[in-house]
């Protein structure tokens, strides 16, 4: 009869520990990559820097400015007045093209011109900035 040789308990323990360490390293790298992808976010701080009516031109002129305080770049994809796209009121913005990119830590500024016939003096207008992120940013403005 032949003697069968088996792995000694010490060698078996070393092999089990090595496999456990290798698996834990793999799980740690996977969890780290998963956490990194979910920790990026864009956050816009919306400030109305000034607003005024231009009587000679027959329009309201609203200047909006803000900063992206998040860790991810974002883009302003739409601007709404009272829940409707600004263009429904005959309004225009400068810069005239959407989307407007706002890098992380970067500022934005835009001027919206709205015909006086769309709103009246003293009326409250809800301005909503829609971005490519899940959160929208709104501010109420009373026209002078």
Image (cartoon, rainbow, N blue to C red):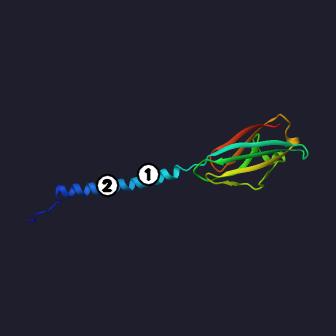
Could you say whether the residue bearing mark 1 is in a helix, strand or loop? Answer: helix
In the image as oriented, which residue stretches furthest toward the left?
Answer: 1
Q: Residues within 10 Å of mark 2 (few under 14, many from 20)?
A: few
Cα separation, mark 2 vs mark 1, equals: 15 Å
Question: Upstream in the sequence, badge 2 or badge 1?
Answer: 2
Q: Are marks 2 and 1 in contact (CB under 8 Å)?
A: no
Residue 143 in picture, x, y percent from top left: 81, 37
Q: Residues within 10 Å of mark 1 (few under 14, many from 20)?
A: few
Q: Is residue 58 left or right of residue 14?
A: right
In the image as oriented, which residue stretches furthest toward the right?
Answer: 56
Residue 125 appears in which quarter of the rendering?
Answer: top right
Circle 2 residue: 21
Q: Is residue 97 left or right of residue 102?
A: right
Location of the N terminus (image quadrant): bottom left
Residue 113 in picture, x, y percent from top left: 82, 47
Q: 50 or 74, which is in the foreground? A: 50
Location of the C terminus (image quadrant): top right
What label sits on residue 74 in the rendered view?
A: none
Q: Is residue 129 left or right of residue 23?
A: right
Circle 1 residue: 31
Residue 88 in picture, x, y percent from top left: 81, 46
Residue 119 in picture, x, y percent from top left: 85, 39
Q: Residue at x 82, y 35 (%)?
A: 123
Could you say whether the residue bearing mark 2 is in a helix, strand or loop? Answer: helix
Q: 116 or 24, which is in the foreground? A: 116
Q: Is residue 26 left or right of residue 127?
A: left
In the image as oriented, which residue stretches furthest toward the front?
Answer: 49
> Is residue 125 positioned above or below 9 on the image?
above
């Amino acid at each position: 009869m032949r003697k069968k040789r088996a792995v000694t308990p010490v060698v078996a323990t070393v092999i089990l520990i090595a496999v456990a360490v290798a698996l834990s390293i793999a799980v740690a790298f996977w969890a780290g990559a998963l956490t990194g992808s979910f920790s990026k976010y864009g956050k816009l701080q919306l400030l109305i820097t000034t607003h005024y009516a231009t009587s000679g031109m027959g329009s309201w002129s609203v200047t909006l400015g803000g900063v992206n305080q998040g860790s991810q770049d974002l883009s302003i994809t739409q601007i709404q007045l009272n829940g409707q796209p600004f263009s429904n009121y005959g309004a225009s913005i400068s810069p005239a093209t959407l989307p407007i990119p706002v890098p992380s830590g970067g500022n934005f500024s835009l001027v919206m011109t709205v015909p006086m016939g769309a709103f009246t003096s003293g009326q409250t207008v809800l301005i909503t900035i829609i971005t490519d992120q899940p959160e929208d940013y709104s501010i109420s403005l009373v026209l002078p």
